[in-house]
Image (cartoon, grey):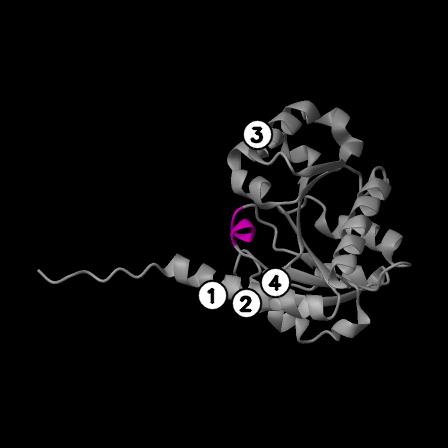
Amino acid sequence: MTDIKLIKIKESITADNDRSADLIRNELANNKVFMINIMSSPGAGKTSLIIATMKILQNKYHINVIEGDIDSTVDSEKIIRNGGDAVQIQTGGDCHVDASMIKAAIETIDLKDYDVIFIENVGNLVCPAEFDTGANLKVMILSVPEGDDKILKYPLMFNVCDALIINKIDCIEFFDFDFNVLKNRVSLINPKMKIFQVSAKTGEGIIEWCDWLSKQIDCYNKSLNL
């Protein structure tokens, strides 16, 4: 009986992706650019949160947004209408953006013109958690209508992210959402995760989130000057 040669495709793909992500991080560091990967399920409010954040921080940082979607340029158009700069990635069916896609997007950007780049990943709670994009910070948005049990269904996403933004708290009275239950579950999976309660619609909690994010960016910049 001949030996069976086993080729582990996923391991090969993720290894290649991780190498590309490291190169992206080095390029961002050389240009003193801080990149944030925003992930969530569809409709959780990624674009609205980015716009609300951008409006507060744009006087301090020059910001660009890399928009990842299976199709369309709808979200890029929203960013531009609100005074931002955007690059659109159309994944052509892929349920996430990976390092090679981000590299292609960055090649269209003059990094010397920017301090911060947001990645708006494809709306999905599975694939985006598995692929390193080269971002310095991973942030997940969970909207109130989705429920407090999402962490039980998608633990990897909660495990890999540095911060959790609970969005749409303005409609909490209409849904069975328990903040304390969610926080307890998060503490078991990722005790270091920072949690924010916000409404991108009303602006509640956005200042606190932006202040924290600004500190992360400033700490990053200081580390590059050491």
> Which mark sits nearer the N-terminus, 3 or 2?
2
The kind of residue on which mark 2 rests is: Ser
Q: Which residue is mark 2?
A: 20
> Which mark sits nearer the N-terminus, 4 or 2?
2
Q: Which residue is mark 1?
A: 16
SS under mark 1:
helix
Residue 107 relative to residue 112: left or right: left
Q: Position of residue 155 (x, y in %)?
A: 53, 38
C-alpha separation, residue under disc 4 versus residue under disc 3: 36 Å
The kind of residue on which mark 4 rests is: Asp
Residue drawn at 84 percent across, 64 percent down: 62
Q: Position of residue 23 (x, y in %)?
A: 59, 68
Foreground tag (4 vs 2): 2
Q: Which residue is mark 4?
A: 71
Q: Are marks 4 and 2 in contact (CB under 8 Å)?
A: no
Mark 1 residue crowding within 10 angstroms, few (<14) / some (14–19) / many (20+)? few
Dividing the image into 4 quarters, which one contains the N terminus? bottom left
C-alpha separation, residue under disc 1 versus residue under disc 4: 25 Å
